[in-house]
Image (cartoon, rainbow, N blue to C red):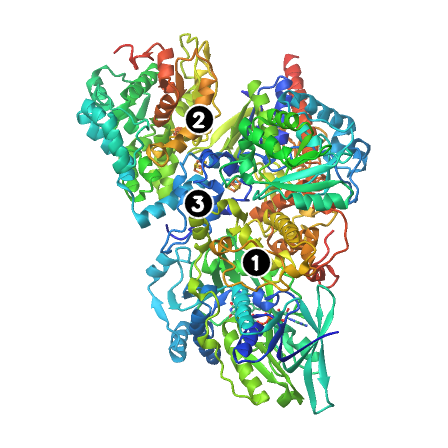
């Protein structure tokens, strides 16, 4: 039997699985579909903004204490959060994606709208876009690409003092096919011939001393090779700017994690939607998934819920104001009154109350009821569904996922070791 | 098609959040601009289709292969592949269907026809001249991996012939062989029977129809309905008696379970009883294993066997039980393919305008197999058309995992594709 | 100050004002139309989408019914491509008892509305989602109509006949001369809301076609006109549940019509008196009521994905009327202020329906001719507007064109199938100040993701278009057209846009210059439309949109600026205490 069944294949679920298998647990992941990594930037945000401040947080490690008391980072404490991020960085290293921080500080890289966005660990492909780098930039797009507009980026970056200019290359440099999204374009760039065409075209554009910003399409499977090919061919740094979903950098990260898991014998089953469960005496026996006919039972000693809140599909809500967790019907801290969910301004710096609530947990990341008692003896929770955080607003999406994923796996391990110890005694 | 209904397929379009994950994985739109991808032809185009329109607004949906990769990766549960199938059926209803598609849809008739004189049929079907003509006249791609009729009799013949030798037992399964086993690959059925019997089960082979999938995927819903109704009539009795209906063709079992009821809106008690009793063979064997009743007296099989779980199998959403059970065979190394699809997708790759697309789609799988090195003797895959495509794409024989199990029990010869007992 | 002299000044760029300008220009007058925002900013752009057959009024208000059926027939000829020939059902649900159905049939016969009872089985075959418990169904020639396109092409027709169109020009004062008893309106003071410049338009006759604002405009000349603003809420469902307009066969009430418009189905409406025509907030109970009523027509409607809710304000005018707004007459009101108030040179036309806008214009201009002492007959009924050769609109139209021309790679708004060239042509071809204008032009951001993907794309594309324009006509602004060409008749056709010359933006400063402003305004405008219906699937969508704009784009941290557009002003109305929704904690 499995030690741990993880529901959700987003960053939290994948990270938890990797940590759990490393700790010697037998693990499996089930998920309804591909997770949220496909939508995000592929960089690891830990904490970008605090309490509506205009300026980005310089270093997350100096500011965690200022978060709400119930925030997952506060629950875990600075040391464990930082430990988890470091652990992640080490364990993603073999992928060759090259995740680094700027000396334990946030670094600022250009967003596709031309804002400087703070992130903590940036992959090698994004780091040369850093604001601290004083080289001029040329932002290069492709005619007809629907998600990348160099002139927009340039306008806003130069308004903030960056020396930068825009250029457009013909679409045909990338592909003969006309209807390609970002992930598909990235696949085109897996091909060395495309890479060479890119080098040749960029040579005509780039001026000495300039670094080159491109949409994040530099390879889906062969990214490291594509990046190296471009940088060597052009003798300057090249960086990617992640844009609208689907995000190639996010897909690369998801793929790298899945491969790491597969190498360790962990199965990641996609296309399996959890639709029910069975518990006895407060202990979950199995979770059921939908199939082409009968529900399929997945038994395990422990279960980790990492379904990602509203966006991941972990929560649902009705016009009457009901807001609930869909598998175990866990109580949520979201106001159960629709009039309290939103503020009049989309960009209100305080965020929307509906997105701040979630699953309340104890120090071991076990979902708790109003009295603070664990609801099920063998259920843990990690990721965006945790209460008292709005990871999108805070720019802590990946950090919360990693820190809570790692911590939940460790908590499961501790508990199972304790159980074995009791049995042995 | 009827205007958008409360049909669960149509309604699932409401789930779409436009994230394009499906399109990023669709193997067909990856290789051709002729197919704009699942999101576009599915939940997006659906909002622009309407019942009584004189013109069908879109035709690109016909390039969907029905492989269901999109359904698998969609994070919100849009039933894209089925939506596409229904849109295609609407097109067919409005514009009629080329003879070729009618022919390809009628697997069972073809199978039967060829079986009267299989050698002749094979010659007629496979000589270069007739393939050339078939391409010109009917649009069946000249190079596509068409099946060959069994020249040693149909599976039905074998069942009749060996009736006396079959195991009698209180534990019984009903075997759904489907058309491919019946007419082209009776040895799959023999291997399945051997494995069932080895595990102590008596095998009932009842009269049965084609599952109707080829008709469904060519948009002939009316004819498919007749087929499924027939199967419901012939098989539901067993299901009511508590017997499992177990099949070796992953696409047939999927059709009985889900495709036919969903696409044709057949949700009555009888169809549902059949659905609930139907199993893919490895799904069923795995349950046996979990109950501790599956025999693991395997011989060692020191070889490397690249395994591709075909998309029709993945669409069952039961994991990869074949992989799990084959992993119990000593010394068998099982590299797992993560290729999305082999490309053939039933009869898709037979069509001349789609043959190259199918080959391009399959490249991912072919590359995976070739990357396994030269010491590979076989590949394994649960789906018949997929195996034919795989053999066509890489020059290696391909086997059904049930053949592998039967061989590991010592009951079956992988090279001859026959029971060791004859 | 700049001065303009004209024969007729029309105030208001809704359907009525556009109709009056068209009619007047065809009669050979010099015309200036001023609209304070984009065309259809008012009620016309916030209506239900129904081309009335008159059935709704057959019992209650036969005069209105006659006007509707006559205009229905005319508009099908003059504005064909703005109309979808959906036909309409009047259905009797178990709640609708009594003799109304018989009176309805009799009423239709009396006023001449073709009305046939449809066998239940046939009705359910055509509309399978219809409540199976309905007992009778009558079919009438209802249709659905795109008022954005209709008003734009009407204005294009007016312009071709010589009218001058000034959008984003707000009337801030009326010019009057003479003393009490012999006063006369001689034109208006108008402010360009983009540049802030003022100009004076002198006119022989000023026509107040400002709908629910008619009272406010008249007040500028100290004329008391009481318009009751009656707010109506509508809710759009993610896809067309029905392909026929569905009306309840009963006395008109709340939430009793379901209209298939473009890709959505719209259930409406309510009717609430409000203090100001810009008070467009939507209360939860209003949405709940629409969904509950919708379920009676199409059971399950409330469970489907809801895209958006909006409100429009009826300009209900009744001399000395104080009762409930639903009961105030919806017939048109043409006020001859010379007769009524002793003020010459000024007419007010308000009330009525979109369906009757042409007729309203005709009556207004007949009166105008009489006042001006000329005899020029109305020609609008026989004069099709540009673009009618496209035939009736049908829902698959865009998909069909995108497919046959293989334009999939050019889609910018994937939900509503807007191509890049459609967007560029619309931005260049008619005055465009905000992305919301482009929404009205080509349906940008009107689909399920509500601008999640296309807002960014549109801002980026317009920035590129602006740069391209600057490059091709750098310092020489004269090389650029002074005013957009106003060619809008094919604005909704992907195929047509693809065959046009590359777009060039007109000269002149515009908020288009600041892409950040475009982004913020449009995102806020969309937010305002979705918050009343954010739950379930639409909430998930909104969270993805948040991930995009905050997480990926970081647009809440773009370089700060103090720019504002007319749209900024408009949505800020929501957040001013007392006007906006309650602040939550
Ligand atoms: C909820 C609702 C649903 C409806 N549904 C339907 C329907 O389905 N079918 C139908 O036929 N009819 C319908 N109607 C009626 C129809 O929409 C209106 O009768 C019609 O649109 C009114 O057009 P209008 O031009 O008179 O007014 P408006 O469209 O309101 O135009 C007035 C214009 O004047 C402008 N303006 C205001 N002040 C100034 C100023 N100071 N300077 C310059 N310009 C100014 C405004 O910006 C506005 O654009 C509906 C109405 C409502 C409220
Ligand atoms: S993956 Fe699902 S939700 Fe995403 S675009 Fe495709 S159908 Fe829509
Ligand atoms: S079923 Fe396969 S081919 Fe068809 S849209 Fe989905 S992924 Fe693409
Ligand atoms: S035959 Fe094969 S992998 Fe191949 S299409 Fe079918 S199931 Fe997909």
Same chain check for tags 1 and 2: no
* Front: mark 1 or 2: 1
Q: Chain of mark 2?
A: B
* Front: mark 2 or 3: 2
Alpha carbon separation for disc pair 2 and 3 = 34 Å
Q: Taking B106 as reference, is C457 above or below it?
A: below
Q: Chain of mark 3?
A: B
Residue where numbered disc 2 is placed: B363
Alpha carbon separation for disc pair 1 and 2 = 43 Å
- Give whichever of discs 2 and 3 has the lower sequence position: 3
* Front: mark 3 or 1: 1
Q: Which quarter of the frame holds ligand 3?
A: top left
Labelled disc at residue B8: 3
Query: Please, what secondary structure does the residue beneath circle 1 have?
Result: helix
Give the residue displayed 35% in from the left and 48% down from the top: B90
Closer-to-camera residue (A259/A133): A133
Q: Is mark 2 within 8 Å of ligand 4?
A: no
């Amino acid at each position: 039997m499995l030690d741990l069944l993880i529901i959700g294949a987003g960053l939290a679920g994948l990270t938890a699985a990797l940590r759990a298998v490393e700790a010697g647990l037998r693990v499996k992941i089930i998920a309804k579909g591909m997770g949220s990594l496909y939508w995000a930037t592929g960089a690891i945000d830990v904490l970008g903004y605090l309490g509506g401040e205009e300026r980005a947080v310089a270093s997350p490690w100096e500011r965690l204490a200022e978060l709400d008391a119930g925030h997952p980072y506060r629950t875990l404490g600075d040391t464990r959060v930082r430990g988890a991020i470091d652990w992640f960085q080490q364990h993603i290293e073999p992928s060759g994606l090259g995740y680094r921080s700027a000396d334990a500080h946030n670094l600022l890289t250009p967003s596709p709208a031309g804002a400087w966005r703070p992130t903590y660990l940036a992959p090698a492909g994004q780091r040369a876009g850093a604001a601290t780098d004083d080289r001029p930039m040329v932002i290069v797009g492709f005619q007809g690409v629907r998600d990348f507009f160099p002139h927009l980026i340039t306008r806003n970056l130069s308004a903030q003092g960056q020396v930068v200019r825009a250029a457009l290359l013909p679409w045909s440099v990338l592909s003969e096919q006309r209807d390609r999204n970002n992930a598909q374009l990235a696949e085109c760039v897996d091909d060395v011939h495309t890479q060479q065409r890119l080098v040749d075209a960029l040579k005509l554009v780039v001026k000495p001393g300039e670094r080159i910003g491109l949409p994040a399409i530099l390879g889906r499977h062969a990214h490291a090779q594509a990046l190296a090919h471009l940088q060597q061919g052009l003798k300057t740094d090249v960086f990617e700017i992640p844009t609208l979903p689907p995000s190639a950098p996010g897909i690369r990260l998801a793929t790298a994690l899945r491969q790491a898991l597969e190498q360790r014998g962990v199965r990641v089953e996609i296309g399996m939607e959890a639709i029910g469960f069975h518990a006895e005496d407060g202990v979950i026996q199995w979770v059921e998934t939908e199939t082409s006919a009968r529900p399929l039972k997945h038994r395990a000693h422990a279960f980790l819920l990492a379904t990602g809140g509203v966006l991941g599909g972990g929560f649902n809500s009705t016009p009457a104001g009901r807001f609930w967790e869909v598998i175990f019907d866990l109580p949520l801290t979201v106001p159960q009154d629709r009039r309290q969910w939103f503020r009049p301004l989309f960009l209100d710096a305080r965020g929307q109350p509906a997105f701040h609530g979630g699953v309340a947990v104890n120090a071991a990341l076990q979902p708790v009821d109003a009295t603070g008692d664990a609801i099920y003896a063998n259920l843990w929770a990690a990721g965006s569904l945790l209460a008292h955080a709005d990871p999108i607003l805070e720019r802590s999406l990946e950090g919360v996922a990693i820190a809570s994923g790692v911590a939940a796996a460790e908590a499961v391990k501790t508990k199972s070791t304790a159980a074995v110890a009791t049995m042995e005694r | 098609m009827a205007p958008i209904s409360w049909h669960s397929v149509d309604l699932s379009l409401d789930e779409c959040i436009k994230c394009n994950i499906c399109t990023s994985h669709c193997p067909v739109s990856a290789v051709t601009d002729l197919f704009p991808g699942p999101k576009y032809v599915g939940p997006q185009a659906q909002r622009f289709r309407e019942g009584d329109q004189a013109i069908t607004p879109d035709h690109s949906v016909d390039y969907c292969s029905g492989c269901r990769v999109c359904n698998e990766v969609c994070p919100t549960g849009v039933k894209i592949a089925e939506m596409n199938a229904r849109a295609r059926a609407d097109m067919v209803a409005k514009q009629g269907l080329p003879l070729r598609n009618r022919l390809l849809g009628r697997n069972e008739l073809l199978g039967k026809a060829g079986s009267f004189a299989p050698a002749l049929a094979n010659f007629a079907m496979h000589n270069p001249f007739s393939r050339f003509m078939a391409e010109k006249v009917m649009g069946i791609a000249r190079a596509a991996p068409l099946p060959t009729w069994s020249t040693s009799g149909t599976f039905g013949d074998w069942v009749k012939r060996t009736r006396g030798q079959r195991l009698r037992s209180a534990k019984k399964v009903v075997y759904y062989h489907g058309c491919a086993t019946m007419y082209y690959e009776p040895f799959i059925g023999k291997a399945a029977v051997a494995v069932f019997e080895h595990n102590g089960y008596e095998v009932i082979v009842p009269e049965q129809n084609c599952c109707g999938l080829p008709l469904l995927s060519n948009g002939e819903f009316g004819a498919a309905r007749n087929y499924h109704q027939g199967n419901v009539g012939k098989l539901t009795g067993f299901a009511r008696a508590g017997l499992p209906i177990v099949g070796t063709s992953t696409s047939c079992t999927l059709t009985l379970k889900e495709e036919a009821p969903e696409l044709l809106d057949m949700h009555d008690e009888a169809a549902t009883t059949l659905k609930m009793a139907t199993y893919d063979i490895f799904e069923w064997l795995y349950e046996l294993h979990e109950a501790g009743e599956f025999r693991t007296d395997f011989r060692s099989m020191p070889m490397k066997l690249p395994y591709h779980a075909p998309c029709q199998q993945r669409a069952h959403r039961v994991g990869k039980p074949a992989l799990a059970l084959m992993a119990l065979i000593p010394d068998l190394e099982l590299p797992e393919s993560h290729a999305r699809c082999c490309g053939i997708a039933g009869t898709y790759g037979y069509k001349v305008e789609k043959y190259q697309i199918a080959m391009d789609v399959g490249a991912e799988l072919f590359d995976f197999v070739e990357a396994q090195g030269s010491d590979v003797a076989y590949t394994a895959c649960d789906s018949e058309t997929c195996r034919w495509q795989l053999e066509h794409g890489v020059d290696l024989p391909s086997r059904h995992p049930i053949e592998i199990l039967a061989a590991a029990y010592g009951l079956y010869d992988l090279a001859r594709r026959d029971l060791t007992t004859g | 100050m700049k001065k303009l002299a004209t024969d007729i000044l029309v105030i208001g760029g809704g359907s009525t004002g556009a109709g009056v300008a068209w009619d007047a220009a065809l009669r050979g007058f010099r015309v200036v139309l001023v609209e304070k925002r984009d065309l259809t900013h008012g009620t016309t752009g916030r209506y239900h989408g129904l081309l009335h057959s008159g059935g709704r009024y057959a019992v209650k208000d036969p005069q209105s019914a006659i006007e509707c059926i006559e205009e229905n027939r005319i508009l099908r000829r003059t504005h064909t491509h703005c109309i979808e020939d959906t036909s309409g059902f009047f259905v009797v649900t178990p709640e609708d008892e009594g003799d109304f159905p018989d009176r309805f049939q009799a009423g239709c016969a009396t006023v001449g509305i073709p009305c046939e009872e449809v066998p239940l089985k046939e009705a359910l075959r055509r509309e399978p989602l219809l409540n199976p418990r309905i007992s009778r169904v009558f079919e009438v020639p209802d249709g659905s109509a795109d008022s954005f396109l209709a008003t734009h092409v009407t204005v294009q027709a007016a312009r071709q006949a010589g009218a001058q169109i000034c959008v984003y020009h707000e009337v801030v004062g009326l010019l009057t001369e003479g003393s009490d008893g012999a006063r006369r309106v001689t034109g208006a003071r108008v402010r360009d809301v983009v540049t802030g410049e003022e100009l004076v338009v002198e006119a022989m006759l000023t026509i107040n076609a400002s709908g629910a604002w008619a009272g406010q405009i008249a007040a500028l000349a100290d004329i008391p006109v009481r318009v009751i603003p009656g707010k109506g809420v509508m809710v759009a469902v993610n896809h067309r549940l029905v392909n026929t307009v569905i009306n309840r066969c009963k006395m008109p009430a709340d939430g009793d019509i379901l209209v298939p418009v473009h890709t959505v189905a719209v259930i409406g409406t309510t009717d609430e008196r409000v203090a100001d025509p810009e008070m467009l907030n939507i209360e939860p109970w209003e949405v709940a009521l629409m969904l509950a009523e919708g379920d009676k027509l199409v059971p399950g409607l409330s469970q489907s994905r809801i895209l958006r809710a909006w409100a429009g304000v009826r300009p209900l005018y009744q001399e000395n009327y104080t009762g409930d707004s639903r009961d105030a007459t919806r017939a048109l009101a043409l006020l001859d202020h010379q007769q009524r108030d002793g003020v010459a040179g000024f007419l007010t036309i308000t009330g009525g329906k979109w369906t009757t806008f042409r007729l309203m214009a005709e009556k207004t201009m007949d009166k105008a001719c009489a006042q001006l002492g000329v005899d020029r007959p109305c020609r609008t009924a026989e004069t099709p507007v540009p673009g009618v050769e496209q035939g009736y609109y049908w829902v698959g139209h865009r998909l069909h064109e995108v497919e046959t021309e293989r334009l999939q790679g050019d889609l910018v708004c994937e939900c509503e199938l807007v191509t890049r060239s459609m967007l560029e042509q619309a931005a260049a071809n008619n005055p465009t100040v905000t992305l919301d204008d482009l929404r009205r032009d080509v349906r940008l951001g009107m689909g399920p993701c509500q601008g999640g993907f296309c807002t960014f794309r549109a801002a980026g594309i317009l920035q590129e278009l602006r740069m391209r324009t600057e490059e091709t006509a750098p310092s020489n602004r004269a090389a650029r057209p002074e005013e957009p060409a106003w060619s809008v008749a094919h604005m909704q056709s992907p195929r047509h846009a693809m065959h046009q010359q590359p777009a060039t933006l007109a000269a002149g400063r515009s908020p288009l210059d600041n892409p950040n402003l475009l982004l913020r305004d449009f995102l806020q405008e969309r937010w305002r439309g979705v918050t009343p219906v954010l739950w379930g699937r639409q909430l998930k969508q909104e969270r993805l949109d948040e991930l995009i704009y905050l997480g990926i784009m970081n647009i809440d941290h773009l370089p700060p600026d103090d720019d504002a557009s007319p749209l900024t002003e408009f949505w800020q109305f929501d957040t001013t205490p007392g006007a906006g929704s309650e602040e939550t904690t």
